[in-house]
Image: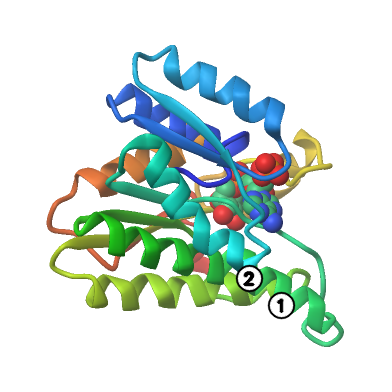
Amino acid sequence: MVTGAAKRLGRAIAERLADEGVHVVLHYHRSRKAAEEASASVSARGVNAWTMAADLGRPEEAEGLADRAWECSGGFSILVNSASIFGKGRLADAPYESFLRHLTVNAWAPLALARAFARKAGAGQIVNLLDARVGGYNFTHAAYFMSKRTLEYITRHLALDLAPDFRVNAVAPGLILPPEGEGPEYLDRLTETVPLKTHGEPADVADAVVCLLKSGFVTGQTLYVDGGRHLRD
Ligand SMILES: NC(=O)c1ccc[n+]([C@@H]2O[C@H](COP(=O)([O-])OP(=O)(O)OC[C@H]3O[C@@H](n4cnc5c(N)ncnc54)[C@H](OP(=O)(O)O)[C@@H]3O)[C@@H](O)[C@H]2O)c1
């Protein structure tokens, strides 16, 4: 199952998994039409695809999603937590609701899904999507970065808790796609901050997910896909 799979990186990961012969449950929240298009693209690769809606900002929906996905697909062995929100706000003045919402969608939901999945599956793999700047500070998206840092901690903790039956890793993308509402000039403006002086593509992130899934002796690891940007934080 891939969460947030209707569009952008989540869709690229779902399609890349399909290219590897993996059947995919595509979770979405609001983007039903896009999820159906992504599902068609996945099944055109010769695997089964299912779409499933859930609001991961509601703890009870996050808790129930793994069971629902399990029932509709007949069981799954890989969970990719890609769904996320990326709200603006400084640490000095971000309201409580914003912190709570970022923590709920970006950290609590991946944990709730991972636990429910682990109970059902008995063995498998989890990949969480972080952010390449998770080790540093971001003054304009404070709640987002706190939630991603929490998810990094959850990744490492679960890697120990769920071993030896599960491997739990993370991919930390850097400059890949502009946030919703921003155009390509957003990427052009920021490539100067990237040591490799370019931005990545969704396929780079999907490749990293597959690389971790295939690396049988790797757990608790974060793979940065950021042209070296994290080295500067
Ligand atoms: N894009 C980048 O360059 C970049 C850089 C650094 C890190 N990342 C990380 O990589 C992952 C994927 O990035 P992205 O740009 O593809 O993400 P995104 O477009 O910002 O969000 C992915 C999906 O999350 C879903 N989502 C949002 N709120 C939700 C909620 N309450 N319940 C359930 N789903 C919800 C949305 O689904 P619906 O559309 O169906 O509502 C959305 O399509 C994220 O975890 C992001 O933080 C991305």
Pick the residue in front: 18 or 70. Answer: 70
The residue under the point 36% across, 44% down is 208
Name the image quarter holding the C terminus. Answer: bottom right
Q: Is residue 147 left or right of residue 124?
A: right
Label 2 to label 1: alpha-carbon separation: 6 Å
Q: Is mark 2 within 8 Å of ligand 1?
A: yes
> The disc labelled 2 sits on which kind of residue?
Thr
Residue underneath mark 1 = 100
Classify 77 as above or below 136: above
Q: Position of residue 137 (x, y in %)?
A: 63, 77
Instruction: Give residue 82's mark.
Output: none
Classify 56 as above or below 203: below
* Dot 2 and dot 1 residues touching (CB under 8 Å): yes
The residue under the point 42% across, 49% down is 80
Q: Is residue 94 visible?
A: yes
Image-quadrant location for residue 218: bottom left
Pick the residue in front: 22 or 189. Answer: 22
The residue under the point 60% across, 59% down is 61
Q: Is mark 1 within 8 Å of ligand 1?
A: no
Q: Position of residue 66 (x, y in %)?
A: 44, 53
